Amino acid sequence: MTKYSHSKLGTFLQCKYKYKLQYIDKIKADLETIEPFMGKRVHETLEKLYKDLKFQKVNSKEELLVFFNIAWNKNWHEDIVINKEYTAENYREMGKKFISDYYDHYKPFNHLTTLGLETQDFLPLDENTQFHVRIDRLACDKEGNYYVCDYKTNSSLKVQEDLDEDKQLAMYSLWVKQKYPDAKSVKLVWYFLAFDKEMISERSAEQLLKLKRETLHIIKEIEACNNFPTTTSPLCHYCVYKPICPAWRHEFALEEQQEEALDGKELADTYAQLDTEEKRISKEKEELKEKLISFAQKENITAIFGTDKKISITPFVSISYPKTEEFINLLKEKGVYEDVATINTQKLSSKVRKNELPEEVISQLSTEHGWSVRVGKRRD
Protein backbone atom coordinates (compact mmCIF):
# COMPACT_ATOMS: atom_id res chain seq x y z
CA MET A 1 0.00 0.00 0.00
CA THR A 2 1.35 3.41 -1.01
CA LYS A 3 1.80 5.97 1.77
CA TYR A 4 1.71 9.73 1.31
CA SER A 5 1.99 12.70 3.64
CA HIS A 6 1.22 16.40 3.47
CA SER A 7 4.92 17.22 3.13
CA LYS A 8 5.32 14.63 0.37
CA LEU A 9 2.45 16.09 -1.65
CA GLY A 10 3.63 19.62 -0.91
CA THR A 11 7.14 18.83 -2.12
CA PHE A 12 5.77 17.56 -5.45
CA LEU A 13 3.71 20.73 -5.93
CA GLN A 14 6.61 22.94 -4.86
CA CYS A 15 9.35 21.36 -7.01
CA LYS A 16 9.15 18.07 -8.86
CA TYR A 17 12.94 17.76 -8.96
CA LYS A 18 13.15 18.02 -5.18
CA TYR A 19 10.43 15.35 -4.97
CA LYS A 20 12.49 13.04 -7.18
CA LEU A 21 15.64 13.49 -5.09
CA GLN A 22 13.87 13.04 -1.77
CA TYR A 23 11.24 10.38 -2.42
CA ILE A 24 12.36 8.47 -5.53
CA ASP A 25 16.16 8.65 -5.44
CA LYS A 26 16.02 8.81 -1.63
CA ILE A 27 19.10 11.03 -1.44
CA LYS A 28 19.93 12.05 2.10
CA ALA A 29 20.99 15.68 2.17
CA ASP A 30 23.69 16.79 4.58
CA LEU A 31 22.45 20.38 4.57
CA GLU A 32 20.38 21.52 7.57
CA THR A 33 19.04 25.03 7.97
CA ILE A 34 18.53 26.97 11.17
CA GLU A 35 14.76 27.54 10.92
CA PRO A 36 13.68 23.85 11.04
CA PHE A 37 16.43 23.14 13.60
CA MET A 38 15.02 25.78 15.95
CA GLY A 39 11.45 24.69 15.22
CA LYS A 40 12.22 21.08 16.09
CA ARG A 41 13.71 22.06 19.44
CA VAL A 42 10.62 24.14 20.28
CA HIS A 43 8.32 21.25 19.33
CA GLU A 44 10.35 18.86 21.50
CA THR A 45 10.02 21.22 24.47
CA LEU A 46 6.25 21.62 24.12
CA GLU A 47 5.92 17.87 23.70
CA LYS A 48 7.77 17.41 27.00
CA LEU A 49 5.44 19.93 28.67
CA TYR A 50 2.28 17.95 27.79
CA LYS A 51 3.86 14.51 28.13
CA ASP A 52 4.90 15.27 31.70
CA LEU A 53 1.45 16.70 32.46
CA LYS A 54 -0.03 13.27 31.74
CA PHE A 55 2.00 12.03 34.71
CA GLN A 56 0.86 14.96 36.87
CA LYS A 57 4.22 16.69 36.59
CA VAL A 58 3.94 20.41 35.91
CA ASN A 59 7.23 21.77 34.61
CA SER A 60 8.16 25.30 35.52
CA LYS A 61 9.03 27.67 32.72
CA GLU A 62 12.65 27.61 33.83
CA GLU A 63 12.75 23.80 33.64
CA LEU A 64 11.42 23.88 30.07
CA LEU A 65 13.99 26.47 29.05
CA VAL A 66 16.75 24.31 30.52
CA PHE A 67 15.42 21.35 28.52
CA PHE A 68 15.35 23.50 25.37
CA ASN A 69 18.97 24.62 25.87
CA ILE A 70 20.18 21.08 26.51
CA ALA A 71 18.41 19.82 23.38
CA TRP A 72 19.85 22.72 21.38
CA ASN A 73 23.42 22.04 22.50
CA LYS A 74 23.09 18.28 22.05
CA ASN A 75 21.90 18.54 18.44
CA TRP A 76 23.84 21.60 17.30
CA HIS A 77 26.57 21.22 14.69
CA GLU A 78 28.61 23.77 12.79
CA ASP A 79 27.25 22.79 9.37
CA ILE A 80 23.79 24.20 10.09
CA VAL A 81 23.13 26.91 7.50
CA ILE A 82 21.96 30.37 8.55
CA ASN A 83 20.67 32.22 5.48
CA LYS A 84 19.90 35.57 7.06
CA GLU A 85 21.92 38.26 8.79
CA TYR A 86 21.27 36.77 12.22
CA THR A 87 23.33 34.41 14.39
CA ALA A 88 22.56 31.04 15.91
CA GLU A 89 22.15 32.76 19.27
CA ASN A 90 19.49 35.04 17.80
CA TYR A 91 17.51 31.97 16.80
CA ARG A 92 18.11 30.29 20.16
CA GLU A 93 16.76 33.35 22.00
CA MET A 94 13.80 33.48 19.65
CA GLY A 95 12.98 29.85 20.45
CA LYS A 96 13.21 30.57 24.17
CA LYS A 97 10.82 33.49 23.77
CA PHE A 98 8.32 31.28 21.93
CA ILE A 99 8.34 28.83 24.83
CA SER A 100 8.12 31.55 27.49
CA ASP A 101 5.22 33.34 25.81
CA TYR A 102 3.31 30.09 25.28
CA TYR A 103 3.87 29.07 28.91
CA ASP A 104 2.62 32.39 30.28
CA HIS A 105 -0.38 32.37 27.94
CA TYR A 106 -1.71 28.87 28.62
CA LYS A 107 -0.65 27.88 32.14
CA PRO A 108 -1.89 25.85 34.01
CA PHE A 109 -2.59 23.92 30.73
CA ASN A 110 -5.79 22.27 31.98
CA HIS A 111 -8.47 23.69 29.68
CA LEU A 112 -8.17 20.71 27.31
CA THR A 113 -7.41 17.00 27.73
CA THR A 114 -4.46 15.79 25.70
CA LEU A 115 -5.20 12.60 23.73
CA GLY A 116 -2.01 12.33 21.70
CA LEU A 117 1.35 13.96 21.05
CA GLU A 118 3.19 13.71 17.73
CA THR A 119 0.66 11.10 16.62
CA GLN A 120 1.84 8.43 14.17
CA ASP A 121 -1.01 6.86 12.20
CA PHE A 122 -2.39 6.50 8.68
CA LEU A 123 -5.72 7.50 7.14
CA PRO A 124 -6.95 5.18 4.35
CA LEU A 125 -7.89 7.20 1.24
CA ASP A 126 -8.77 4.21 -0.93
CA GLU A 127 -7.88 0.53 -1.11
CA ASN A 128 -4.33 1.33 -2.27
CA THR A 129 -3.43 4.64 -0.61
CA GLN A 130 -2.87 5.87 2.93
CA PHE A 131 -2.22 9.38 4.26
CA HIS A 132 0.28 9.86 7.08
CA VAL A 133 -1.20 11.60 10.13
CA ARG A 134 1.22 13.35 12.47
CA ILE A 135 -0.46 15.82 14.81
CA ASP A 136 1.61 17.98 17.17
CA ARG A 137 -1.09 17.66 19.81
CA LEU A 138 -4.57 16.14 19.70
CA ALA A 139 -6.92 17.25 22.48
CA CYS A 140 -10.58 17.36 23.44
CA ASP A 141 -12.85 19.22 25.85
CA LYS A 142 -15.68 17.99 28.04
CA GLU A 143 -18.32 19.00 25.46
CA GLY A 144 -17.09 16.52 22.86
CA ASN A 145 -15.11 18.95 20.71
CA TYR A 146 -11.77 17.75 19.38
CA TYR A 147 -8.76 19.96 18.64
CA VAL A 148 -6.02 19.34 16.09
CA CYS A 149 -3.21 21.58 17.36
CA ASP A 150 -0.23 22.72 15.31
CA TYR A 151 2.71 24.83 16.53
CA LYS A 152 4.13 27.31 14.01
CA THR A 153 7.57 28.83 14.55
CA ASN A 154 7.82 30.72 11.25
CA SER A 155 8.01 34.50 11.21
CA SER A 156 4.90 35.13 9.11
CA LEU A 157 1.33 35.22 10.38
CA LYS A 158 -1.24 33.71 8.04
CA VAL A 159 -4.59 35.37 7.43
CA GLN A 160 -7.82 33.56 8.27
CA GLU A 161 -8.66 33.02 4.59
CA ASP A 162 -5.46 31.03 4.11
CA LEU A 163 -6.14 28.90 7.18
CA ASP A 164 -9.65 28.17 5.96
CA GLU A 165 -8.02 26.70 2.82
CA ASP A 166 -5.24 24.83 4.66
CA LYS A 167 -5.09 21.19 3.60
CA GLN A 168 -2.78 19.59 6.17
CA LEU A 169 -4.83 19.95 9.33
CA ALA A 170 -8.04 19.46 7.37
CA MET A 171 -6.80 16.03 6.24
CA TYR A 172 -5.97 15.23 9.85
CA SER A 173 -9.54 16.11 10.85
CA LEU A 174 -10.75 13.35 8.51
CA TRP A 175 -8.69 10.92 10.57
CA VAL A 176 -10.07 12.32 13.84
CA LYS A 177 -13.65 11.90 12.63
CA GLN A 178 -12.89 8.30 11.69
CA LYS A 179 -10.97 7.54 14.88
CA TYR A 180 -13.38 9.29 17.25
CA PRO A 181 -16.96 9.00 15.92
CA ASP A 182 -18.25 10.70 19.08
CA ALA A 183 -16.64 14.01 18.02
CA LYS A 184 -19.26 16.77 17.86
CA SER A 185 -16.78 18.99 16.01
CA VAL A 186 -13.12 18.99 14.99
CA LYS A 187 -11.43 22.34 15.37
CA LEU A 188 -8.15 23.07 13.61
CA VAL A 189 -5.91 25.18 15.83
CA TRP A 190 -2.69 26.95 14.88
CA TYR A 191 -0.42 28.48 17.51
CA PHE A 192 1.69 31.15 15.81
CA LEU A 193 4.35 31.31 18.48
CA ALA A 194 6.19 34.32 17.05
CA PHE A 195 3.03 36.37 17.60
CA ASP A 196 1.63 34.60 20.68
CA LYS A 197 -1.56 34.18 18.67
CA GLU A 198 -4.02 31.30 18.34
CA MET A 199 -6.17 30.90 15.20
CA ILE A 200 -8.95 28.37 14.55
CA SER A 201 -10.74 26.96 11.52
CA GLU A 202 -13.27 24.19 10.83
CA ARG A 203 -14.37 22.16 7.80
CA SER A 204 -17.78 20.90 6.74
CA ALA A 205 -18.35 17.32 5.61
CA GLU A 206 -18.70 18.57 2.03
CA GLN A 207 -15.39 20.43 2.21
CA LEU A 208 -13.62 17.36 3.56
CA LEU A 209 -15.05 15.15 0.82
CA LYS A 210 -13.84 17.62 -1.80
CA LEU A 211 -10.40 17.77 -0.16
CA LYS A 212 -10.14 13.98 -0.18
CA ARG A 213 -10.93 13.91 -3.91
CA GLU A 214 -8.36 16.65 -4.60
CA THR A 215 -5.73 14.79 -2.61
CA LEU A 216 -6.31 11.59 -4.55
CA HIS A 217 -6.08 13.59 -7.79
CA ILE A 218 -2.64 14.92 -6.80
CA ILE A 219 -1.54 11.40 -5.90
CA LYS A 220 -2.61 10.12 -9.32
CA GLU A 221 -0.66 12.97 -10.92
CA ILE A 222 2.42 11.97 -8.92
CA GLU A 223 2.14 8.32 -9.87
CA ALA A 224 1.75 9.20 -13.56
CA CYS A 225 4.65 11.66 -13.55
CA ASN A 226 7.83 10.77 -15.46
CA ASN A 227 9.30 14.26 -15.84
CA PHE A 228 10.68 16.07 -12.79
CA PRO A 229 11.83 19.62 -13.71
CA THR A 230 13.21 22.14 -11.22
CA THR A 231 11.03 25.01 -10.03
CA THR A 232 12.86 28.03 -8.62
CA SER A 233 11.23 30.16 -5.92
CA PRO A 234 12.22 31.93 -2.67
CA LEU A 235 11.79 28.52 -0.98
CA CYS A 236 14.95 27.36 -2.76
CA HIS A 237 17.05 29.20 -0.18
CA TYR A 238 15.75 26.81 2.50
CA CYS A 239 16.10 23.64 0.41
CA VAL A 240 18.55 21.01 1.64
CA TYR A 241 19.16 19.87 -1.96
CA LYS A 242 20.24 23.29 -3.22
CA PRO A 243 23.96 22.37 -3.55
CA ILE A 244 23.16 19.53 -5.99
CA CYS A 245 20.24 21.16 -7.81
CA PRO A 246 20.87 22.01 -11.50
CA ALA A 247 19.30 25.42 -10.91
CA TRP A 248 21.84 26.31 -8.16
CA ARG A 249 24.80 23.91 -8.39
CA HIS A 250 26.91 26.35 -10.42
CA GLU A 251 26.65 28.96 -7.66
CA PHE A 252 28.17 26.53 -5.16
CA ALA A 253 30.90 25.59 -7.67
CA LEU A 254 31.74 29.30 -7.99
CA GLU A 255 32.13 29.59 -4.23
CA GLU A 256 34.68 26.77 -4.46
CA GLN A 257 36.48 28.59 -7.29
CA GLN A 258 36.24 25.64 -9.64
CA GLU A 259 37.88 26.44 -12.99
CA GLU A 260 34.96 25.22 -15.10
CA ALA A 261 32.60 27.27 -12.98
CA LEU A 262 34.67 30.42 -13.57
CA ASP A 263 34.44 29.82 -17.33
CA GLY A 264 30.66 29.71 -16.99
CA LYS A 265 30.69 32.93 -14.94
CA GLU A 266 32.56 34.71 -17.73
CA LEU A 267 30.04 33.51 -20.30
CA ALA A 268 27.13 34.58 -18.10
CA ASP A 269 28.62 38.04 -17.47
CA THR A 270 29.21 38.61 -21.20
CA TYR A 271 25.70 37.47 -22.10
CA ALA A 272 24.14 39.61 -19.36
CA GLN A 273 26.13 42.65 -20.54
CA LEU A 274 24.91 42.15 -24.11
CA ASP A 275 21.35 41.62 -22.87
CA THR A 276 21.51 44.92 -20.95
CA GLU A 277 22.84 46.70 -24.02
CA GLU A 278 20.15 45.11 -26.15
CA LYS A 279 17.45 46.36 -23.77
CA ARG A 280 18.96 49.85 -23.81
CA ILE A 281 19.01 49.87 -27.60
CA SER A 282 15.46 48.50 -27.70
CA LYS A 283 14.28 51.32 -25.42
CA GLU A 284 16.00 53.93 -27.59
CA LYS A 285 14.51 52.30 -30.67
CA GLU A 286 10.99 52.51 -29.20
CA GLU A 287 11.51 56.19 -28.34
CA LEU A 288 12.72 56.89 -31.89
CA LYS A 289 9.79 54.95 -33.25
CA GLU A 290 7.35 57.23 -31.43
CA LYS A 291 9.16 60.31 -32.78
CA LEU A 292 9.07 58.91 -36.32
CA ILE A 293 5.30 58.27 -36.05
CA SER A 294 4.71 61.79 -34.70
CA PHE A 295 6.79 63.29 -37.52
CA ALA A 296 4.94 61.26 -40.18
CA GLN A 297 1.54 62.27 -38.77
CA LYS A 298 2.55 65.92 -38.57
CA GLU A 299 3.82 65.98 -42.16
CA ASN A 300 1.07 63.66 -43.47
CA ILE A 301 3.59 61.27 -45.04
CA THR A 302 4.06 57.47 -45.01
CA ALA A 303 7.83 57.29 -45.55
CA ILE A 304 10.79 59.10 -44.02
CA PHE A 305 14.08 59.01 -45.91
CA GLY A 306 17.54 58.83 -44.39
CA THR A 307 21.00 58.77 -46.00
CA ASP A 308 20.86 55.11 -47.09
CA LYS A 309 17.57 53.81 -45.74
CA LYS A 310 13.94 54.79 -45.64
CA ILE A 311 11.51 54.21 -42.82
CA SER A 312 7.96 53.30 -43.84
CA ILE A 313 5.20 54.41 -41.50
CA THR A 314 1.98 52.47 -42.05
CA PRO A 315 -0.99 52.02 -39.72
CA PHE A 316 -2.31 48.59 -38.71
CA VAL A 317 -5.25 47.25 -36.77
CA SER A 318 -4.76 44.88 -33.80
CA ILE A 319 -7.83 42.80 -33.05
CA SER A 320 -8.76 41.35 -29.68
CA TYR A 321 -11.78 39.19 -29.09
CA PRO A 322 -13.78 37.91 -26.11
CA LYS A 323 -12.52 34.48 -25.09
CA THR A 324 -15.97 33.27 -24.11
CA GLU A 325 -18.08 30.28 -25.03
CA GLU A 326 -20.79 32.65 -26.31
CA PHE A 327 -18.42 34.23 -28.81
CA ILE A 328 -17.19 30.82 -30.03
CA ASN A 329 -20.78 29.66 -30.47
CA LEU A 330 -21.51 32.85 -32.45
CA LEU A 331 -18.60 32.12 -34.82
CA LYS A 332 -19.90 28.57 -35.29
CA GLU A 333 -23.42 29.82 -35.88
CA LYS A 334 -22.19 32.18 -38.61
CA GLY A 335 -20.12 29.44 -40.22
CA VAL A 336 -16.72 31.10 -39.79
CA TYR A 337 -15.31 29.21 -36.81
CA GLU A 338 -13.33 26.67 -38.85
CA ASP A 339 -11.74 29.49 -40.87
CA VAL A 340 -10.45 31.43 -37.87
CA ALA A 341 -9.89 28.79 -35.15
CA THR A 342 -6.32 27.79 -34.29
CA ILE A 343 -4.73 25.31 -31.90
CA ASN A 344 -3.19 26.82 -28.76
CA THR A 345 0.38 25.65 -29.31
CA GLN A 346 1.52 26.89 -25.90
CA LYS A 347 -1.03 24.71 -24.09
CA LEU A 348 -0.29 21.83 -26.44
CA SER A 349 3.44 22.06 -25.66
CA SER A 350 2.70 22.16 -21.95
CA LYS A 351 0.66 18.96 -22.17
CA VAL A 352 3.44 17.28 -24.16
CA ARG A 353 6.00 18.18 -21.46
CA LYS A 354 3.69 16.88 -18.73
CA ASN A 355 2.91 13.71 -20.71
CA GLU A 356 -0.80 14.47 -20.51
CA LEU A 357 -1.73 13.54 -24.10
CA PRO A 358 -2.81 10.15 -25.50
CA GLU A 359 -0.20 8.26 -27.50
CA GLU A 360 -2.36 8.58 -30.62
CA VAL A 361 -2.10 12.38 -30.42
CA ILE A 362 1.62 12.42 -29.59
CA SER A 363 2.38 10.18 -32.58
CA GLN A 364 0.98 12.88 -34.88
CA LEU A 365 3.25 15.59 -33.49
CA SER A 366 6.72 16.57 -34.59
CA THR A 367 8.77 18.12 -31.82
CA GLU A 368 11.85 20.30 -31.98
CA HIS A 369 13.94 20.62 -28.85
CA GLY A 370 15.78 23.82 -28.02
CA TRP A 371 17.02 25.93 -25.15
CA SER A 372 15.59 29.10 -23.63
CA VAL A 373 18.26 31.55 -22.43
CA ARG A 374 17.16 34.51 -20.31
CA VAL A 375 18.81 36.94 -17.93
CA GLY A 376 17.59 37.36 -14.36
CA LYS A 377 18.80 38.56 -10.98
CA ARG A 378 21.50 36.50 -9.26
CA ARG A 379 19.09 35.54 -6.45
CA ASP A 380 16.09 34.37 -8.49
Image (cartoon, rainbow, N blue to C red):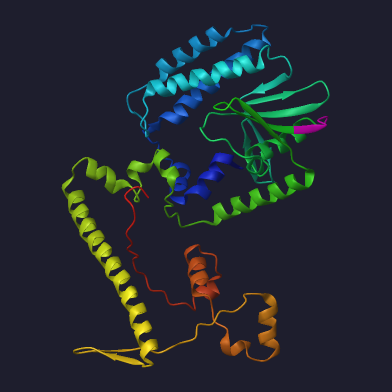
Q: Nearer the viewer, residue 266 or 355?
A: 266
| Helix, strand or loop: magenta stretch | loop
Q: Is residue 86 left or right of residue 111?
A: left
Which quarter of the figure has residue 228?
bottom left
Q: Any magenta on residue 185?
A: yes
Q: Nearer the viewer, residue 175 or 328?
A: 328
Q: Is residue 113 left or right of residue 226?
A: right
Task: Tell me, yes or no, if residue 5 can be seen here.
Answer: no
Residue 300 in the image, given as x and y percentages of width and height: 39, 92
The residue located at (66%, 81%) in the rendering is: 328
- Name above or below for residue 86 compared with residue 48: below
Q: Any magenta on residue 328?
A: no
- Name above or below for residue 190 compared with residue 7: above
Which quarter of the figure has residue 339?
bottom right
- Name above or below for residue 309 compared with residue 220: below
The residue located at (43%, 41%) in the rendering is: 26
Quarter holding the N terminus?
top right
Q: Residue furthest left?
A: 259
Residue 147 in the image, given as x and y percentages of width and height: 72, 28
Q: Residue furthest front?
A: 298
The residue located at (30%, 75%) in the rendering is: 285
Residue 105 in the image, given as x and y percentages of width and height: 64, 18
The residue located at (62%, 11%) in the rendering is: 52
Span shown in magenta: 182-186
Residue 278 in the image, given as x and y percentages of width and height: 27, 68
Q: Nearer the viewer, residue 167 or 109?
A: 109
